[in-house]
Image: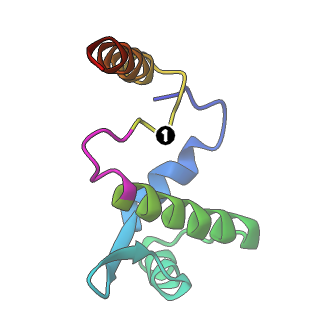
């Protein structure tokens, strides 16, 4: 994972109350109502921008978790060693397909 420069407390909060919740046939972003309940129970008061960002992060997490079910899905952090290896494998497979074709 990429190194966090700041705001790591928000990621901790996200995983305390989420990062997702059941929705329909799968999972979806945490609602503001769920965040409000978490705030009341934890005694933590979020600023409006923090709540909006946490809602967006929850939505992004849910979206990526749905996309991640594909076996060949590259990690969302593109400059990692895993992503570089996956790209190398794709290139090798393309070369093999060209040479076999």
Tell me where residue 83 appears, x and y as whole percent: 43, 24
Location of the N terminus by quadrant is top left
Quadrant in the picture for residue 16: bottom left
Of 38 and 28, nearer the camera is 28
Residue at 58% in and 32% down: 4
Residue at 36% in and 57% down: 65
Residue 93 is inside the magenta segment: no
Quadrant in the picture for residue 48: bottom right
- Magenta segment's dominant SS is loop
Tell how many labels: 1
Residue at 38% in and 21% down: 94
Residue bearing mark 1:
76
Q: Is residue 56 above or below residue 3?
A: below
Work out whether residue 18 can be spotted: no
Of 22 and 10, nearer the camera is 22
For this orientation, the residue located farthest to the front is 101
Question: In the shown orientation, is residue 80 left or right of residue 8?
Answer: left
Work out whether residue 80 can be spotted: yes
Location of the C terminus by quadrant is top left
Of 40 and 66, nearer the camera is 66
Neighbourhood count class around disc 1 (C-alpha, 10 Å): few under 14, some 14–19, many 20 upward: few
Question: In the shown orientation, is residue 87 left or right of residue 32?
Answer: left
Tell me the magenta residue range: 67-73
Residue 72 is inside the magenta segment: yes
Tell me where residue 96 appears, x and y as whole percent: 30, 14
Q: Secondary structure at mark 1?
A: loop
């Amino acid at each position: 994972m990429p190194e966090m420069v700041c705001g790591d407390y928000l990621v901790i909060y996200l995983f305390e109350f989420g990062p997702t919740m059941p929705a329909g046939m799968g999972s979806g972003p945490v609602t503001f109502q769920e965040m409000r309940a978490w705030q009341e129970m934890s005694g933590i008061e979020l600023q409006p921008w923090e709540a909006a960002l946490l809602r967006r992060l929850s939505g992004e997490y849910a979206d990526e978790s749905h996309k991640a079910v594909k076996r060949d899905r590259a990690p969302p952090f593109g400059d990692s060693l895993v992503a570089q290896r996956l790209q190398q494998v794709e290139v090798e497979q393309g070369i093999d397909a060209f040479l076999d074709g």
